[in-house]
């Protein structure tokens, strides 16, 4: 039995289009020194809704084991994680400029 539901086709098309949008985004990663000399890793360049950026931030924080926040469309992670963040973002389909 074949299921030719146009809604399923549309959802598949939208899902694959979202992956394309992720791959087209070029993110940059840098660090800043904040109060008391504490480093903060900043990931910028997202063109996603805030909820999706928060999802990426949550995944990064869990993978690295650190705190952080989403502020003005960028992810801020406590500590210097420039060595680990690019690989984690690439696994999610983002292009990263270091």
Image (spheres, rainbow, N blue to C red):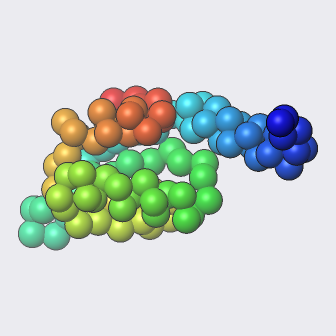
Q: Residue at 35% across / 67% down in the picture?
A: 69
Is 36 above or below relative to 4? below
* 97 and 21: which is toward the camera: 21
Q: Residue at 26% across / 58% down in the picture?
A: 62
The picture places residue 66, in percent across and down from the top left corner, at: 19, 61
- Rendered-image quadrant of the C terminus: top left
* 9 and 70: which is toward the camera: 9
Relative horizontal placement of residue 88, taking residue 23 as reference (left or right): left
- Total labels: the figure holds 0
Q: Which residue is the extreme one toward the front?
A: 1
The picture places residue 86, in percent across and down from the top left corner, at: 31, 35
Q: Which residue is the extreme one toward the left?
A: 36
Is 93 above or below relative to 10? above
* Residue 19 occupies quadrant: top right
The picture places residue 13, in percent across and down from the top left corner, at: 77, 37
Relative horizontal placement of residue 58, taking residue 49 as reference (left or right): left
Tell me if I can see residue 36 in this picture.
yes
Q: Residue at 39% across / 32% down in the picture?
A: 90
Relative horizontal placement of residue 79, taking residue 30 as reference (left or right): left
- Rendered-image quadrant of the N terminus: top right
The picture places residue 20, in percent across and down from the top left corner, at: 64, 32
Tell me if I can see residue 77 in this picture.
no
Relative horizontal placement of residue 4, taking residue 13 as reference (left or right): right
Is 22 above or below relative to 74? above
């Amino acid at each position: 039995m074949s299921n030719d539901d146009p809604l399923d086709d549309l959802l598949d098309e939208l899902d694959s289009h979202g992956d394309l949008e992720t791959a087209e985004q070029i993110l940059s990663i840098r660090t800043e020194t904040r109060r008391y000399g504490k480093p903060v890793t900043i990931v910028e360049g997202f063109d996603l809704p805030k909820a999706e950026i928060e999802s990426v931030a949550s995944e990064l924080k869990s993978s690295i084991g650190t705190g952080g926040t989403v502020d003005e469309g960028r992810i801020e992670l406590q500590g210097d994680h420039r060595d680990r963040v690019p690989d984690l973002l690439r696994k999610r389909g983002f292009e990263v400029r270091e």
